Image (tube, grey):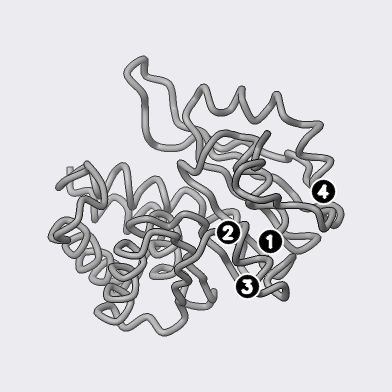
Amino acid sequence: MDIKAVLQQQYGLSESAVALLETYVGLVEAAPLNLTAWRGHELWTRGVWDSLEILPVLGTTSGQGLDIGSGAGFPGLVLAVVRPDWAWTLLEARGRRAAFLEGTIRALGVSHVAVVAARAEEWIREVPDQRERFDVVTLRAVGGARMSLELGLPFVKVGGKLVLVKSFEGRQEVEAERAWMEELGGHLVEWRGGPLRDERGRPDQIGVVAKVQRTPLAYPRRAAKLGR
């Protein structure tokens, strides 16, 4: 199976977008630091494909996106490559990973993407105009459900969406936190089955949380209290 051809057809990707994704995947694989355990075909399936499943959440209009804990750039940088009408901010607290993202953005020539090297709970205090600014905020593998909700929802504007990429078990964890979600101004509206399967054949889960009211200014709390 030619995974690139499959993705191009399934998501209507342009030739230029596929070429940029090829360059990006090559940079991730060649990076001197251990960005991810994925290699080769897995970078396309577990990284790119899983990220592209978020595309329907963006809709057809342009907007501003934030990827918290961006790491190697999945999903934020992938989404930025295929939707250049969106402005993306990649938030990554680890300096070497943030430097990798900055270098990759320069190599790809995607000027609508910015990297911020900071922790989410600190950045929102240092630059308060980031609060409730973004149309879509994504989190993948950033703590448990309570922490993900507390970190993500304060950045989402009312009417926007928080996207949580979780394992099959992670869905149950998020479902159990509906009261916490509502306290933070969110309402769970959709689960999308991702393309990946665990060892039992169960699909990963993409949860979509609508921001229905403003998040109290007390959130997110300092690191020691996050998600507690």
- Whether pointer 1 and pointer 3 mark residues with C-beta atoms closer than 8 Å, the reply is no
* Residue holding disc 1: 155
Residue type for callout 2: Ala
Q: Nearer the viewer, mark 3 or mark 4?
A: 4
Q: Separation of disc 3 and disc 2 at Cα? A: 20 Å
Q: Position of residue 221 (x, y in %)?
A: 70, 50
Q: Is label 4 in a helix, a strand or a loop?
A: loop
Q: Separation of disc 1 and disc 4 at Cα? A: 11 Å
Sequence-first disc among 3 and 4: 3
Q: Is label 1 in a helix, a strand or a loop?
A: helix
Sequence-first disc among 1 and 2: 2
- Whether pointer 1 and pointer 2 mark residues with C-beta atoms closer than 8 Å, the reply is yes
Q: Position of residue 2 (x, y in %)?
A: 18, 49
Q: Separation of disc 3 and disc 4 at Cα? A: 20 Å
* Residue holding disc 2: 120
- Whether pointer 1 and pointer 4 mark residues with C-beta atoms closer than 8 Å, the reply is no
Q: Where is the N terminus found, in terms of image quarters? A: top left
**Mark 1 neighbour class, 10 Å CA radius: few under 14, some 14 to 19, many 20 or more:** many
Q: Nearer the viewer, mark 3 or mark 2?
A: 2
